[in-house]
Amino acid sequence: MPEPHFACPRCDSPLADIHCDACKLQFPTLDGLPCLFADPDATLGEWRNRWQLALAELEQNAEEAARALQACSDSSSTARRLQHLSSAYAEQRRLLEDLLAPLGPLEAVAKETYLALRTRLPTHQGLMSYAPNVHRDWCWGKVENQASVDAIRDIVGPRSSTKVLVLGAGAGRLAYDVHQLLEPELTVALDINPMLVLLNARMARGDTVAFFEFPLAPKTVEDCAIKRFLAAPAPAREGFRCVLADGLRPPFVDEQFDLVLTPWLLDVVDADTRQMLAHINRLLVAGGHWVNHGSVAFRRPNVEDCLTLEELTELTDANGFTTVATNEHDGPYLASPASRHARRELVSTAMAEKTGTVGKPARHQNLPEWLVTARAPIPLSPAFQSQITATQVHGFIMSLIDGKRSIRDVASVMEKERLMPARDAEAAIRGFLIKMFEESQAATRNL
């Protein structure tokens, strides 16, 4: 049975038993799964931070629901909902502790510390960001899952694939279905999120995992928190491998896969699309195929990077590929049977053949070198200088918040300190506090 040939995500040297001789680094495993980050200790530390924060939030949610319950009539529907939620949050905390036990142990640290210390991981990639996908993949999503694997099967056709890589496999159902349906000798499911990778591995082994779903718009009181039992239809065939790594720095030796699949990835990651195409190109054997599957909804800061499907196809054909087939299907997306909220997606599936090679992609860097090494001087750029002044003002405002002063009181102090006229200060302080309030709300939703 073939195994993936790993390369060091730091220096690209081939690994022997996930050890890099050049870097003198033994990469860790998580429940036996390779953990191939350029800085594995730091990255796993960041994920532990997010895990700790998720646990703290679940505990806080349980306590808030319990406190609210005390003010309700025992016979009211609201009381039933709050009782149900309080119990579900508490149990979900225990279930999450069990699922992510390989990440531990944890130390008790205040939740606010984790909120303050933002990490190098993608800001949109919270530990629980894809919890709805977990339930869709392994519980109630038969229609959606079947539509996706049918689209892959129809576009790949009778071609025989020996080694398949799924970049950004998420909760893993599509990777599992492709492995079962196309019957390659090896399928590698890679994702950056340890919760998703650990769950995927357990599904592939044939385990059943209990996990709560908290629908966005529950249909009934009981639907506000539903204990689901997640399981694959059967254990995965031999040759299914899960890897914890960053898809922007795929840790593989060049030209070893004959099929690379990117489901809902290119338009989600914070990376230049040309660089992603170069990575995919180098991973494929000559004549290998790349299949992109998803809604193609690019939302980038720069307008020129917000590609349409037509532009993505042109870019593909200009970077070592020739597009050979496309199809589209319209269907439900994350349509939980317990929720009043769902959406429909027009999903595109496109296959391109590797017909040429491109230059070696630049090494992806999440942060500049002076931040990574911690030894080079911190540059005092104009933007930093402006931010320093703003932060000092914000710090002064925050120091005046004592639970007694109003916005108007704080504005008066600002005027006395000759920082700003009270009339202007009141509006500025209100705007600052609105931003602080909204960010604190968003932080709890981004777990």
Image: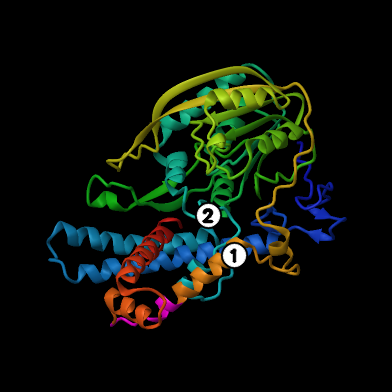
Give me the disc on residue 384.
1
Magenta region includes residue 401: yes
**Image location of residue 19, percent across then percent down:** 81, 55
Magenta region includes residue 144: no
Task: Rate crowding at label 1 as few (under 14), some (14 to 19) or many (20 or more) other CA atoms within 10 Å.
Answer: few
Q: What is the count of numbered marks? A: 2
Q: Nearer the viewer, residue 335 or 98?
A: 335
Q: Residues under labels 2 and 1: Cα distance?
A: 21 Å
Give the residue type at disc 1: Phe
- Secondary structure of the residue carrying tag 2 is loop
Q: Is residue 87 rendered to the left or right of residue 189? A: left
**Image location of residue 273, percent across then percent down:** 63, 36
Q: Nearer the viewer, residue 415 or 263?
A: 415
Q: Mark 2 points at which residue?
A: 123
Give me the disc on residue 330.
none
Identify the image quadrant of residue 375: bottom right
Residue in the picture at 33% in, 78% down: 410
Residue in the picture at 77% in, 33% down: 256
Identify the image quadrant of residue 91: bottom left
- Secondary structure of the residue carrying tag 1 is helix
> Magenta segment range?
396-404
The numbered mark, 2 or 1, whose residue comes first in the sequence reads 2
**Image location of residue 144, percent across then percent down:** 43, 31
**Vertical arrangement, residue 412 with respect to residue 26, above or below:** below
Q: Is residue 343 visible?
A: yes
Q: Which of 382 and 32 is in front in this view?
A: 382
Residue in the picture at 72% in, 34% down: 278
Identify the image quadrant of residue 20: bottom right
